[in-house]
Amino acid sequence: MKNCFDVVIAGGAATGSALAYFLSASRSFKGSVLVIEKDSSYQKCATALSAASIRHQFSTVENIQMSQFGSEFLYGIGETLEVDGERPDVNFHEAGYLFLSTPEGYATLRENNALQRSLGAQIALLSDRQLQDKYSWLNVSDLAGGSLGLKGEGWLDAYGMMRAFRRKAITQGVSYIENEVVQVHREGARVTGVTLNNGETVACGVFVNAAGTGAMKLARQAGIELPIESRKRSVFYVTCPETVNDCPMLIDPSGAYIHPEGEGFICGIQPPADQDPECFDFDVQYPLFDELLWPILAHRVPAFEALRCEHSWAGHYDYCTFDQNVILGYHPDINNMVFANGFSGHGMQQSPAVGRALAELIEFGEYRSLNLKRLGWERVLNNQPIIEKNVW
Ligand SMILES: Cc1cc2nc3c(=O)[nH]c(=O)nc-3n(C[C@H](O)[C@H](O)[C@H](O)COP(=O)(O)OP(=O)(O)OC[C@H]3O[C@@H](n4cnc5c(N)ncnc54)[C@H](O)[C@@H]3O)c2cc1C
């Protein structure tokens, strides 16, 4: 292997591979790209363990636009990422998100909806009566209404998408190696290279930190403190003996979610804040299902009283403690280190947009398609968080 690359990317899951794809797809980019991925089986990364859903229902312009691009990308993914006549199918179920709102949260829901629609998102506002007419299985007694995504929202095979990015990037000339970056070398305002687990060193023109929950360690080695922690999220696959027809991705005002998957559903909920420490183990939080999630789901959909948990898993994501949004781009103290960290549960759907944006930033020194500057380090350093307005 060469020991010098124009761009070295640590982490080859959704973010790293999307970036590798977009860089190598650019006709004007002539540089060499190396992706260093410590586990080519991808068994434990957030991308593979994700609930793999995409929504346009955010309250921040950039988050809405990134997901809109994500959906557009998914429509054409077969053709775009085709290799040797094989077109990837990531099984995009475009069934929409249904955000439910109590009377207290309804003003926020409407405000969010107005912004989403102004950006071209196709999202309908439904009153409690309309919800009941459409979904006879739903308990609307404590709801004021909801907002339903009509286009572009749903769930997919995130692992398949990541693999498709990787495969296409390789055919476009990107090198992938299975190894771990164990040391980042910084001299003044530049990262000069990295040391791998086998002792080899690789010099770089640009270094990209796309290491998910491994990102904090790499940042620290470069002298930068990322406000990010590894947070565990448990996902439960359940079946229900009763029929619940046309169920979209249902988001309860409590934050609990559930959507159809195969013969059953997958569901989850964030643990209460005081039970959500930094965490690296993969033990499923079963009490969360029994004591919190199931009662909420059974209240919202009485048929879910009879849910049966068939299996479950836990994964980790890179949670941005500053404002739960990604930190994207160069740090002002280092000229050639790019960050894409702190996705906080949105990173799978944002990976096509982030891959494209960072490819532009690296090649042209600026964002050209979507201006994601506001998501950069400056907001963190100037203490200007961008807070998503949740609906209760
Ligand atoms: C349970 C769960 C549900 C989720 N649901 C959704 C959802 O519905 N929608 C959504 O958009 N997002 C969701 N997410 C979040 C989403 O999965 C992540 O934000 C996204 O996958 C992040 O991708 P990534 O490539 O940045 O990081 P990761 O997928 O974590 O990949 C990082 C990669 O870096 C590698 N790595 C780490 N350290 C090093 C090192 N030192 N050297 C070399 N390689 C290294 C790792 O092996 C890994 O493969 C969910 C996450 C979880 C855990």
Image (spheres, grey):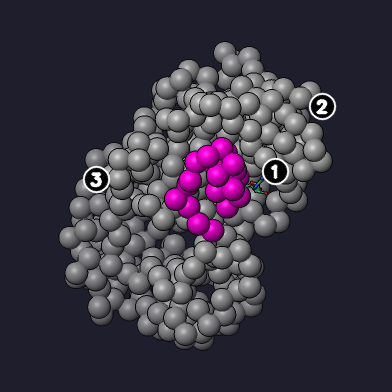
* Mark 2 → mark 3, Cα distance in angstroms: 49 Å
**Residue range corresponding to the magenta coloring:** 209-230
Residue 314 lies, with reference to residue 196, above or below; the image says below
Residue 11 lies, with reference to residue 1, above or below; the image says below
Residue density around tag 3, few if under 14, some if 14–19, many if 20 or more, within 10 Å? some
**Some atom of ligand 1 lies within 8 Å of the CB belonging to the residue at label 1:** yes
Asked whether the beta carbons under mark 1 and mark 3 sit within 8 Å of each other, the answer is: no
Name the residue type under label 1: Val
Q: Nearer the viewer, mark 2 or mark 1?
A: 1
Query: Which residue is tagged 2?
Result: 1
Residue located at (37% from left, 82% from top): 299
Query: Which residue is tagged 3?
Result: 115
List the single residue furthest toward the front: 188
Say left or right for 3 vs 94.
right
Name the residue type under label 3: Leu
- The secondary element bearing badge 3 is classed as helix
* Mark 2 → mark 1, Cα distance in angstroms: 18 Å
Query: If the image is split into quadrants, where does the N terminus sit?
Result: top right
Rendered image: mark on residue 182 = 1
Asked whether the beta carbons under mark 2 and mark 1 sit within 8 Å of each other, the answer is: no
Image quadrant where residue 380 sits: top left
Q: Nearer the viewer, residue 95 or 322?
A: 322
- Measured as percent of width and height from the top left, residue 181 is found at 69, 41
Name the residue type under label 2: Met
Q: Earlier in the sequence, mark 2 or mark 3?
A: 2
Residue located at (63% from left, 67% from top): 281
The answer to whether residue 337 is magenta is no
- Measured as percent of width and height from the top left, residue 298 is found at 42, 82
- Measured as percent of width and height from the top left, residue 229 is found at 50, 57
